[in-house]
Amino acid sequence: MDGPPAVIDVEAISSHTDSVLTMRMDSSTRADIDGVTPAIVRQLNSLLGEDLGAEDDPQVRELVRKGNNLIDPKNRPTENTPAFGAFLYLRDAATLTRRLLWIYTERNGLGTP
């Protein structure tokens, strides 16, 4: 049983990505970074599951390709990844999530995130 489709919570994703993008490397611990990364990856993954118009727009198609690459488990930070690498991954994922959220809201006539 598939159940109802997932609903994109624009406000929550917007707030969460804002919070992540204000994090600073010099004041964030590895535990801080690791604590928020899974949620950002889930949010990115949920947006990648939406119709964002990638088939009609090469720029969106490239963003989707980058997103799929980021969420691929082999490209995610591991416990052996230096904190700086984990921080950069988190920022990249949050930035891309933000961009895809903007595309999602535009395509669905929703308010700007």
Image: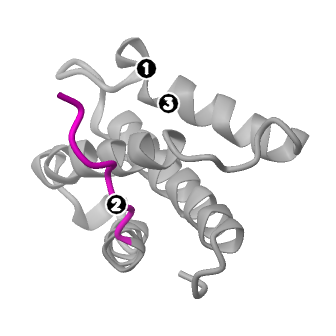
> Quadrant location of the N terminus?
top left
* Residue matched to label 2: 7
2 is within the stretch colored magenta: yes
Between 71 and 110, the one lying in front of the other is: 110
**Circle 1 crowding by C-alpha within 10 Å: few under 14, some 14–19, many from 20:** few
Circles 3 and 2: CB atoms closer than 8 Å: no
Q: What element carries label 1?
A: loop
Front tag of 1 and 2: 2
Between 65 and 52, the one lying in front of the other is: 52
Front tag of 3 and 2: 2
What main secondary structure does the magenta stretch of the protein show? loop
Between 85 and 97, the one lying in front of the other is: 97
* Residues drawn in magenta: 1-9
**Three-letter amino acid code of the residue under disc 1:** Asp
* Residue matched to label 3: 70
* Residue matched to label 1: 72
Q: Residue at x 70, y 66 (%)?
A: 107
Quarter location, residue 83: top left
